Amino acid sequence: MENWYWMTLVVLIGLTVRWTVSLHPYSGAGKPPMFGDYEAQRHWQEITFNLPVKEWYFNSSDNNLQYWGLDYPPLTAYHSLLCAYVAEFINPDWVALHTSRGYESQAHKLFMRTTVLVADLLIFIPAVLLYCHSLREISPKRKIASALCILLYPGLILIDYGHFQYNSVSLGFALWGVLGVSCDWDLLGSLAFCLALNYKQMELYHSLPFFCFLLGKCFKKGLKGKGLESLIKIACTVVASFLLCWLPFFTEREHALQVLRRLFPIDRGLFEDKVANIWCSINVFLKIKDILPRHIQLAISFCLTSVSLLPACIKLTLQPSSKGFRLTLVSCALSFFLFSFQVHEKSILLVSLPVCLVLNEIPFMSTWFLLVSTFSMLPLLLKDELLMPSVVTTVAFLAACATFFPVFEGTSEEELQLKSFAVSVRRRFPGFTFLPRMIQCLFLSSVVTMVLLTILSVTVNPPQKLPDLFSVLVCFVSCVNFIFFLVYFNIVIMWDSRNGRNRKKIN
């Protein structure tokens, strides 16, 4: 009972921080003609409320797709429609066709912010609490600390409650999916993840680990007996979930194809804005978007993404475990973010969620990653005038992690989960004893660089010939960090599987 009292306090702290951030500006506030993501979400409510389903994804005189046309799966559209019914009940002007474009008022801002909070309370926060409660072999205090740190993660708060989006819905469904398959509720977990994927197509970042983990569990049961039965049930659940979500769009073949074209807009190019991935970083030196045809860019992106994520996925299929599943979620999502086609800066949140899930196991590296992930969105946050909430929430998150976890002390080979790897290396290079110290130095240099770049971005005007200098540097520094993390997590995954016998001897 006492534990739930503290969990309630944790939720109240998380909600207070969220609502405080929501008092600040949002994306595109007072910036016509396109405004920003806030207007995009409002406009989707307008379109879904006033137009029939068959027109939601098609260009028309009432639905100009160049003006924030719907480009998310059906579940997002249904959510927009639900919000629109509430908005119309409160004030019909908020969703009036055409005349509501660019609508801004304090009352409407309160309504929109409340819709984010309600979605968070219904989907994401309960999943976080149940996940932390289900953690095994740790004290109740540690479970409460994990919940607090996850709920204080600044990246998600700043994007949903500052910039304005509903990432907590898709990430919440994904977390319910993780809970389900980790606790052997495979059908419920599959259903929850299908809901996540039908809310945001970027959840494809998590799809391969889900597939490989479930397939590996079926292999383990034997594909001639219970394993085959489980596989058929999971497949039926997935198909039924998609059919239910897409049913209104299956009336005509062209209708379904148009939705798919909106979900995967190849014509937009390799990347958008200043995203901290490989392609944006390379673009500084080599204008890859200009010198290579689109289909070649797509092929290279697909090949590099596949090569970087396949080893971890193969290991998970052959040796399925809850821990391996969580780590593979990190590795695959990070591979997609770094190498895949058409990546947004906010997509780093899809990597941050599984990193939050291993915060209890690898606190030092997880905290470091979550700080870098927030920093990587600095150009976007500065554009939205969210510097102050960014600094305050980041400091609060770091303070919580440092208080409740041995973040700065937990850098030994064992605590970094690199003991097996280090032992393997020392067989050939006996002097390889400096790994923890090296990682500590990298962390300090990373933090100092992030602080300096933040200060420069705010206080110094870039050269006229290089107006995006600091934004590009933020992306490049973040990308270098992310490449390091991809290598690190893959080492942890591969050596945890390959050297299980060695670990038993070591321990």
Image: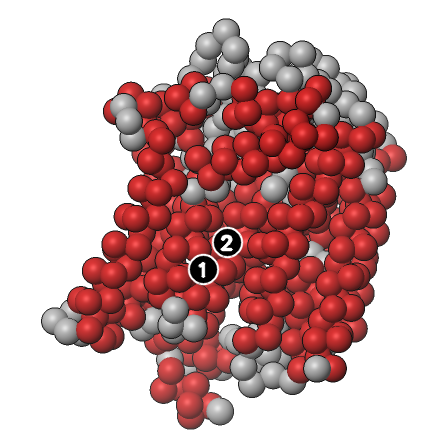
Tell me the amino acid under the disc marked 1: Gly
What residue lies at 72% left-to-right and 25% top-to-bottom?
Answer: 91
Q: Residue furthest top?
A: 61
Q: Position of 469 compared to 429: left or right?
A: right
Q: Residue 403 is drawn in which quadrant?
A: bottom right
Name the residue: 78% across, 68% down.
Answer: 9
Badge 2 is on which residue? 173
Residue 487 x/y as whole percent: 48, 59
The residue shown at (32%, 57%) is 211
Between marks 1 and 2, how big is the CA–CA gap?
A: 6 Å
Q: Would you place residue 189 above or below residue 407 in this image?
A: above
Indicate whether 347 appears above or below 146. Answer: above
Helix, strand or loop at mark 1? helix
Q: In the figure, is residue 76 to the left or right of 145?
A: left
Quadrant assignment for the N terminus: bottom right
Q: Residue furthest right?
A: 459
Which residue bears the numbered disc 1? Answer: 177
Element at label 2: helix
Nearest the camera: 350 or 214?
214
Q: Position of residue 390 (x, y in %)?
A: 78, 46
Looking at the image, which residue is at 36% across and 87% down?
501
* Camera sees residue 335: no
Tell me whether circle 1 and circle 2 mark residues in contact (CB < 8 Å): yes
